[in-house]
Image (spheres, helix red, strand yellow):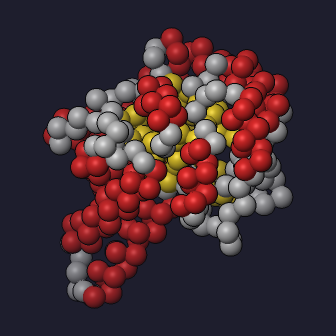
Amino acid sequence: PLVSMTEMLKKARNEQYAVGQFNINNLEFVQAILLAAEEEKSPVILGVSEGAARYFGGFKVTVEVTKVLMDEYNITVPVAVHLDHGSSFEKVIQAIQAGFTSVMIDGSHYPLEENIALTKRVVEAAHAVGVSVEAELGRIGGQEDDLVVQDAEAAYAIPAECKQLIDETGVDCFAPALGSVHGPYKGEPNLGFDRMEEIKNLTGVPLVLHGGTGIPTKDVQRAIQLGHAKINVNTENQIASAKVVREVLAENPDLYDPRKYLGPAREAIKETVKGKMREFGSSQKA
Ligand code: G3H
Ligand code: ZN
């Protein structure tokens, strides 16, 4: 069933595993992620950036395609369709009206008070219709679609501010920027575990780790122990599928039927997602 993230993340936080948010880029991603979740008996979050929704033909198309596929595939595990890095109150409302069951409002580039005010407005509107909300503090570096944050702008979240935002807004989950990066890492990630522990001790909501591509398993496990119940992955699936497309086309220079290269790409995404679900501990938790 299509649900909000609230229950799945509470359960994950209590039982110390993380639900994956896998970003969708095209139809093959939706198919692969839904099938992976069902096969792993794992709850799952489909992450939809505003750019990805545009590519799909809008928020409505994204939701409806997901629903029809879930019917066709007889999906029994909980699935949330989540707006990733929502950029404004208006966009969030449009997504909710189209049927999104969860939204992120990314006010991390605003001063704290403004971020809180915006997030609070979103929570009031979203909760009125049973939609869950994620917020962000600090700034996650790197690039994801339209969102580009230079190294110099990337900032670790301040624990006291995290507590204030969570207390004053009532968000369902919270993404403190703690050194993770969108896209591939330059060298080893340097996650701020000290602050992560402080944030865990000061707050109670499930935490969200963005930039899940390329984080070593030991760091993933530590982040889960320190309150993370949601981990976002996009680039890793993009890399896995692009690799297969390159290989298939290189081996078959005369091939032009997209099903012959996107089919194997879809398979690669599915296997990558299943691997992540096992790594995050969400397999068999649906
Ligand atoms: O919001 C989406 C994620 O944080 C994805 O990050 O592309 O580095 O895996 P990633
Ligand atoms: Zn992100």
| In this picture, residue 24 sits left or right of residue 207 | left
Which of the two residues, 180 or 199, is positioned nearer the viewer here? 199
Q: Residue at x 61, y 28 (%)?
A: 205
Using the image, determine if residue 148 lies above or below residue 114.
Answer: below
Q: Residue at x 37, y 27 (%)?
A: 3
The vertical placement of 75 against 167, above or below, is below
Residue 8, x across and y down, in percent? 43, 31
Q: Residue at x 57, y 64 (%)?
A: 216
Question: In terms of image quadrants, where is residue 284?
Answer: top left
Query: Residue visible at 79% across and 36% down?
Result: 159
Residue 246, percent across and down? 37, 79
**Residue 137 in picture, x, y percent from top left:** 73, 38
Position of the N terminus by quadrant: top left
Q: Position of residue 204 (x, y in %)?
A: 64, 27
Q: Quadrant of the C terminus?
A: top left
Nearer-the-camera pick, 8 or 75: 8
Query: In this rendering, would 69 be left or right of 170?
Result: left
Can you see residue 70?
Answer: yes
Q: Quadrant of residue 203?
A: top right
Q: Nearer the viewer, residue 265 or 168?
A: 168
User: Is residue 64 in view from this perspective?
Assistant: no
Task: Find the residue positioned furthest to the top.
Answer: 128
Say if 232 sits above or below 286 in the image: below
Q: Is 247 left or right of 259, judged from the image as shown?
A: right
Quick check: 118 above or below 207? above
Q: How many numbered circles are shown?
A: 0
Q: Is residue 43 left or right of residue 258?
A: right
